[in-house]
Image (cartoon, helix red, strand yellow):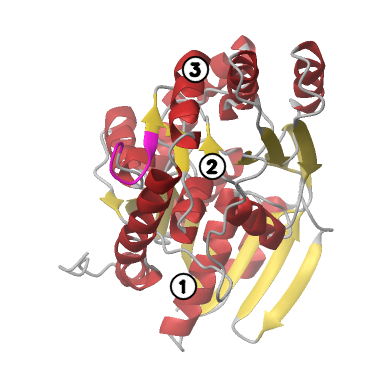
């Protein structure tokens, strides 16, 4: 079988979708020696061209505009590239990711016209929350036009969480298959948190939908009540300058360190060494960085959005708070920082439950069956 996967971005570009796709490809190839994968992705993160990883796996990057980061729009030539890599006696299976990308709609139409099977993976679990009012209005319009087509015309839809499954149903009426991804970690890497000074860790793109500003407001509230912490922020994005200004206004310059866009290994080490990992996001499909923190056995304080409650159980394996409530976040962080024994207990239980619940073997079995148009395994 030849799989032509068309994710918006791919490593070395950093992001949850990119890592999901790359890890999925590795596991699919390992499970099926007769599978070939061609990745057609944008030039974000690398120059356009062809990278042949081996005789069964290659990456082809198309030229793109980027009107909004990170939303690549294909430049002329995309469709010719798609036709070229779908040509041949063996009919390929197409794959798209996330409903609102313009190139996903192009691939959807191409699949229909050429009688090709297409499997879509939905990584979102709510309408777009980041950006200004205009961006959210445009995103909502896209959801009710292009996105419904991308979801509705797919031969099968995979949702990355139960929350994403419900969102797909509510938006398009499509019944998807919910399957959890696995998590790859370097051998021997476990949570070994620092206690002095108490340190909060954050990993993610710096956009307002990630709630980083809420976390900084909560940190200022902690400081004003006598609890001083260090904050280490991994990531970059369009909100960076606004966050820099907020740090100055809140007088947090001595407490907050921006590490910028770091590689995945560095991000994992930062998660492993923070006292508490914080995910203050307004929306998540599943919550990739929360899942990484969970797999490491870190103490997690996160917002109760999207698929995050499917990873962390409030009061049992971590702390969950409502989004956009910095005061509640501050109170919960205060509680977590004051209870080292509970942090250790929650983190270890979270690590064990994550290891059991999130694995690539089950995900690959389900995705492989859907690619071939076969019944989903009953164990999924």
* x and y, in percent, of residue 284 in the image: 46, 36
The answer to if 315 sits in the magenta stretch is: yes
2 relative to 345 in the view: left or right: right
The answer to if 363 sits in the magenta stretch is: no
Tag 3's secondary structure? Answer: loop
Inspect this view and state whether residue 306 appears.
no
Q: Earlier in the sequence, mark 2 or mark 3?
A: 2
- On the image, numbered disc 3 is attached to which residue? 324
Observer-side mark, 1 or 2, equals 2
Q: Using a 10 Å C-alpha cutoff, classify the residue at mark 3 as few (fewer than 14 neighbours), some (14 to 19) or many (20 or more).
A: some
The tag on residue 6 is: none
* x and y, in percent, of residue 297 in the image: 45, 57
Camera-side residue of 174 and 320: 320
Camera-side residue of 255 and 56: 255
Q: Quadrant of the N terminus?
A: bottom left
Total residue callouts: 3
* x and y, in percent, of residue 275 in the image: 57, 45
Distance from the alpha carbon under mark 3 to that under mark 1: 47 Å
- On the image, numbered disc 2 is attached to which residue? 276
200 relative to 109 in the view: left or right: right
* x and y, in percent, of residue 378 in the image: 15, 68
Q: Earlier in the sequence, mark 3 or mark 1?
A: 1
Identify the residue at horizontal 45%, vertical 25% (top origin): 127
Above-or-below relation of 139 to 77: above
Identify the residue at horizontal 50%, vertical 52% (top origin): 293
Please report contact status of discs 1 and 2: CB closer than 8 Å, yes or no.
no
337 relative to 266 in the view: left or right: left
- On the image, numbered disc 1 is attached to which residue? 91
Inspect this view and state whether residue 279 appears.
yes
Q: Using a 10 Å C-alpha cutoff, classify the residue at mark 1 as few (fewer than 14 neighbours), some (14 to 19) or many (20 or more).
A: some
């Amino acid at each position: 079988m030849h799989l032509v996967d068309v994710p918006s971005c791919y490593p070395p570009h950093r992001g949850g979708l990119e890592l999901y796709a790359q890890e999925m490809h590795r596991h699919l190839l390992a499970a099926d020696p007769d599978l070939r994968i061609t990745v057609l992705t944008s030039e974000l993160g690398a120059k356009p061209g062809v990278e042949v990883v081996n005789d069964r796996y290659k990456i082809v990057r198309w030229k793109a505009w980027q009107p909004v980061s990170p939303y690549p729009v294909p430049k002329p030539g995309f469709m010719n590239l798609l036709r070229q890599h779908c040509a041949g006696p063996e009919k390929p299976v197409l794959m798209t990711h996330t409903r609102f990308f313009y190139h996903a709609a192009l691939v959807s139409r191409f699949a229909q016209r050429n009688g090709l099977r297409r499997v879509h993976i939905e990584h979102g679990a709510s309408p777009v929350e980041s950006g200004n009012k205009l961006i959210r209005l445009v995103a909502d319009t896209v959801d009710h036009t292009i996105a419904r087509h991308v979801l509705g015309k797919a031969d099968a839809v995979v949702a990355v969480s139960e929350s994403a499954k419900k969102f797909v149903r509510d938006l398009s009426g499509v019944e998807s298959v919910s399957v959890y991804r696995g998590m790859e970690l370097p051998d021997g890497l476990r949570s070994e948190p620092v206690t002095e000074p108490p340190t909060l860790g954050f990993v993610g793109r710096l956009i307002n939908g990630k709630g980083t500003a809420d976390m900084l407001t909560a940190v200022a509230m902690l400081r004003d009540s006598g609890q001083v912490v260090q904050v280490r922020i991994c990531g970059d994005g369009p909100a960076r300058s606004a966050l820099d200004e907020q740090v100055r206004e809140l007088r947090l310059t001595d407490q907050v360190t921006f590490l910028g866009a770091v590689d995945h290994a560095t991000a994992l080490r930062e998660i492993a060494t923070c006292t508490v990992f914080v995910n203050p996001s307004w929306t998540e499909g599943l919550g990739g960085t929360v899942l990484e923190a969970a797999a490491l056995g870190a103490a997690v304080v996160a917002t109760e959005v999207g698929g995050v409650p499917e990873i962390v159980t409030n009061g049992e394996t971590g702390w969950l708070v409502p989004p956009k409530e910095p005061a509640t976040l501050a109170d919960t962080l205060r509680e977590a920082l004051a209870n080292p024994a509970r942090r250790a207990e929650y983190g270890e239980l979270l690590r064990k439950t994550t290891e059991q619940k999130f694995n690539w073997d089950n995900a690959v079995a389900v995705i492989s069956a859907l690619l071939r148009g076969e019944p989903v395994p009953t164990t999924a």
